[in-house]
Amino acid sequence: MDKEKMSKEKMNKEKMDEIYRENAAIVYKYLCGLTMDKELAEELTQETFFQAVRGIEGFRGDSKISVWLCGVAKKLWYKELQKRSRHKTDALDDTIPSGENIEKKSLDHLEKIEIFRLMHNLDSVTREVMYLRLAGELQFSEIAKILGKTENWARVTYYRGKQNILKGMKEWKVN
């Protein structure tokens, strides 16, 4: 191998190490918000950077590298969901939890379903902000960095989404 090629490989490795150090936490938190599973998020974070190394020439520079990496991570998450849905087998659990108020548990579950239904009806950007904030427990500054927006934009988008959900919950409870 000639010196120029070795020098380029070393530079690329150093650049990818720097990209990893600067963005791994962002990608991991983003995936935690999507997957709600820390171990899976960690696996997918590693796979994201593996895919990024393999496909770095696909990064055109139109956005921040963190936004591109989160896009790679989202695609990997969708692939994982598809894989799981193909292999999913539902087991019936016919045991009744002891000592729990089944009626209250059922109502709580119905409320949770309604909240997710209302979130699903939000526009995709607001829904993503809501998931990152609620499930990912990310700060507004982190959400803004992931989505390439300002912190104030993330706060306003979250607030509007929350107001829509609260309005929908009031209507649901009346019916």
Image (cartoon, grey):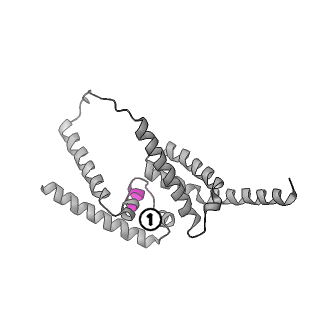
**Dividing the picture into quarters, in which one does residue 153 lie?**
bottom left
Amino acid beneath label 1: Phe
- Whether residue 37 is visible: no
Q: Is 129 situated left or right of 117 in this image? A: right
Q: Which residues are magenta?
A: 129-140
Q: Residue at x 37, y 71 (%)?
A: 156
Instruction: Looking at this view, name the residue that lies furthest to the left.
Output: 175
Q: Nearer the viewer, residue 97 or 171?
A: 171
Q: Circle 1 sits on which residue?
A: 140
x, y percent for residue 142: 49, 63
x, y percent for residue 8: 78, 60
Q: Is 21 situated left or right of 75 in this image? A: right
**Which quarter of the image is occupied by the C terminus?**
bottom left
**Dividing the picture into quarters, in which one does residue 165 lie?**
bottom left
Q: Is 23 situated left or right of 150 in this image? A: right
x, y percent for residue 129: 40, 62
Q: Nearer the viewer, residue 64 or 106?
A: 64
Instruction: Looking at this view, name the residue that lies furthest to the top.
Output: 95
**Mark 1, secondary structure of its residue:** helix
- Whether residue 134 is visible: yes
Q: Residue at x 82, y 56 (%)?
A: 6
Q: Nearer the viewer, residue 24 or 75?
A: 75
Q: Residue at x 43, y 55 (%)?
A: 137
